[in-house]
Amino acid sequence: MKRLLLFFASLAFLAPATAFGGNTAEIRLHCYSLRFQPATAKLFGQTYVLEITGNPSSAAANGELRLMPLEIPYTHGGIFLLQFPFDPTPVPLPFYLDTPFADADDNGLIDDFEVSRGISGTTTGVYDDFAFGESPFQATWNRAANSKDGTCRLAFPDLGLTFNHTFEVIEYAGTLSYTNAGANISGTVQMTQVQNADNKLEGTLALTKENANLLPVIPGSWTHSSGEILAYQASALERIQTNYLAYLFFDDGEPATEALDFVDWDLVVTDSNDANGNGIPDLSDAPQPIRPELSVSRTQTHLLFKITGEIGRLYDLEETGSLIQPVWNKVTSVILSANSQELQWALPAGQVRFWRLKAP
């Protein structure tokens, strides 16, 4: 039996690929608002109820302790809705309040809004009762690390009332699957709320590139697991080593409530991919040419072709029986779904065959 000789050419008529494709990075969203639950307090045997809303145009309590603009000398604020005994209509009391606002690990994110970081401490605030002007109150905070839920004790000396609230940190975590084509970066996002698997976000994230350290975010929208569409816009992602941080603003971060609320977020992308080892993650690095490769081996009954190249690109596998004035014939075509992919082909009849990889 004559021996079959195998030869191959690894590259022909192929422009170098210029994209990082198929990479996955970690993505997180941290809401700057905290969600407070209602609380009660007793005075002389009578029960008082305190709720919070973050939107002054809505009379309904949404539980939002909302981030304030920089010109306000407190980090957060909203409106207390205080219900007195025997009166079903709550009294609105505008207020401002500092949260601990610490960054103990110096990672650029405030611990108050990171589930992995615990907080404790006492802060102060003021509320306006319209009759006597501003009155002070005190907040005592406690939340263990790796817990989205904490407690906040609000003490009002002028009212003689103390309310013990529970509050929730809203954080989402998941993956960003992206392709870096140089000036444009496109990706898909899948996230789940930390410690609340019922809430999910998914959709696309499109970026442009000013340089390796600055990636402007193109406005878009994500779909909540409830079916609601959350439109967003964001500042540019700024790189700090392998982390990218941006401020993200939702038109309405909680469509289930009446008010436009929970709109202020931190967007964080962490990318450990670094194909060329230059210290710049692939998310923002200049794509390096990917030289496609073709290798061939055989079993007793088949040939095994291993094609390495760019995900999503079309390649033709061609063969010829001679390299002297060769006539190349296409054996098959393949679009790579991974950087390296294997094809199986029946052993050809004949003694000598040459193969090459071609990009049309």
Image: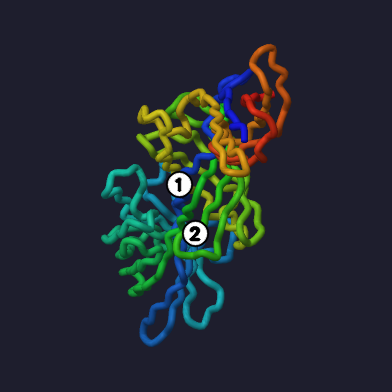
Camera-side mark, 2 or 1: 1
Kindly identify the amino acid type of the residue bearing the numbered disc 2. Answer: Gln
Residue at (38%, 54%) from the top-left corner? Answer: 114
Q: Nearer the N terminus, badge 2 or badge 1?
A: 1
Q: Which residue ends up furthest to the front in the rendered image?
A: 1
In the picture, the disc for residue 193 is 2
In the picture, the disc for residue 26 is 1
**Few, some or many residues within 10 Å of mark 2 (<14, 14–19, 20+):** many
Q: Which residue ends up furthest to the top in the rendered image?
A: 325
Find numbered disc 2 in the image and state the secondary structure of the residue it sits on.
strand
In the rendered view, would you say 139 is above or below 283? Answer: below
Q: Is residue 147 left or right of residue 294?
A: left
What x and y, as percent, mark residue 332? 70, 34
Quick check: marks 2 and 1 in contact, CB under 8 Å? Answer: no
**Quarter of the image containing the N terminus?**
top right
* Residue 153 in which image quadrant: bottom left
In the rendered view, would you say 52 is above or below 23? Answer: below
